[in-house]
Image: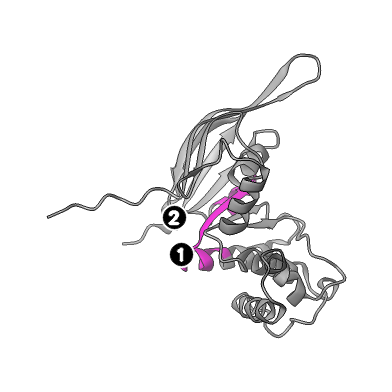
């Protein structure tokens, strides 16, 4: 009987390092050899104080930047040697982004906001609208498709941003401080939505400096001074 090999991780980071020139011949090393894996369907929170390297790591994981050395494999593709166009293609196919500031277009209704990534993918308008409406229904805003962002609450705007991140059917959602502009009750609603999306099979990486936000993830990876200080499993999600 042939044994099946376990599936490869969605994300594999090997000795990631990143530094930036300081302008005086010196360099500032921000990431100091990070290595970790994230499986498909996982929900991971990356925690750390300001200046810990979270944003630099997020940019690499999101294919917005490449490591100075080391390797980052996303869905089996090593990003280290990719150019800007190849990174953009990988990013558009595999990743959806959710930001603290929503980043919605104020003059567009929410249907057009959610459909925007499909414009860049060359999808016809009628198909874009059908897909966007279905995603908005999925996040509980199917009745508000003609509303402008200014007519929505902060929590509703973040739901629109999540819907936009989902519209290209990504394998991975990267959420950067997604509750930073929301009150505690609304934050819990948004985090519950992330949990539901994760239960549906979506891989989620959430960057935060708040322990109350991180506790919604299955695993919490702490970053301090560009190094992994620890990775702990959140027993809150263990069953049985």
Q: Secondary structure at mark 1?
A: loop
Q: Which mark is residue 231?
A: none
Question: In the drawing, does residue 144 fall left or right of residue 175?
Answer: right
Q: Which residue is mark 2?
A: 40
Compare marks 2 and 1 and give the one earlier in the sequence. Answer: 2
Q: Residue at x 67, y 43 (%)?
A: 84
Specify the farthest residue to the bottom.
143
Q: Which mark is residue 201?
A: 1
Residue 216 lies, with reference to residue 112, above or below; the image says: above
Per the image, is 199 magenta? yes
Question: What range of the chain is rendered magenta?
Answer: 194-214
Circle 2 crowding by C-alpha within 10 Å: few under 14, some 14–19, many from 20: some
Q: CA distance from mark 2 to mark 1?
A: 8 Å
- Relative image position of residue 181 (x, y in whole percent): 76, 57
Q: Secondary structure at mark 2?
A: loop
Front residue (pair 113, 184): 113
Residue 55 picture quarter: top right
Front residue (pair 21, 185): 21
Question: In the drawing, does residue 99 fall left or right of residue 139?
Answer: right
Q: Residue at x 65, y 77 (%)?
A: 136
Task: Check if mark 2's residue and mark 1's residue have beta carbons within 8 Å.
Answer: yes
Residue 64 lies, with reference to residue 125, above or below; the image says: above
Q: Mark yes or no: residue 214 visible.
A: yes
- Relative image position of residue 117 (x, y in whole percent): 69, 65
Quadrant of the snapshot with the N terminus: bottom left
Circle 1 crowding by C-alpha within 10 Å: few under 14, some 14–19, many from 20: some
- Relative image position of residue 229 (x, y in whole percent): 52, 32
């Amino acid at each position: 009987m042939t044994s099946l090999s376990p599936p490869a991780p969605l994300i594999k980071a090997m000795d990631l390092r990143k530094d930036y020139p300081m302008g005086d011949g010196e360099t500032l090393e921000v990431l100091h050899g990070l290595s970790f894996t994230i499986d498909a369907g996982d929900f991971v929170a990356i925690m750390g104080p300001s200046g810990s390297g979270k944003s630099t790591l997020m940019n690499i994981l999101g294919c917005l930047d490449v490591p100075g050395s080391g390797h980052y494999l996303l869905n089996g593709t090593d990003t280290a040697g990719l150019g800007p166009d190849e990174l953009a293609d990988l990013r558009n196919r595999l990743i959806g982004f959710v930001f603290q500031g929503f980043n919605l277009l104020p003059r567009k209704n929410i249907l057009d906001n959610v459909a925007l990534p499909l414009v860049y993918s060359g999808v016809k308008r009628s198909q874009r609208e059908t897909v966007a409406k279905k995603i908005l229904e999925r996040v509980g805003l199917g009745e508000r498709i003609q509303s402008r962002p200014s007519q929505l609450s902060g929590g509703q705007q973040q739901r629109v941003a999540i819907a936009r991140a989902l519209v290209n059917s990504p394998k991975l959602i990267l959420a950067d401080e997604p509750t930073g502009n929301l009150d505690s009750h609304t934050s819990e609603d948004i985090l519950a939505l992330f949990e539901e999306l994760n239960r549906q099979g979506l891989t989620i990486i959430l960057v935060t400096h708040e322990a109350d936000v991180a506790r919604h993830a299955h695993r919490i990876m702490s970053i301090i001074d560009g190094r992994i200080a620890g990775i702990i499993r959140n027993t809150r999600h263990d069953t049985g």
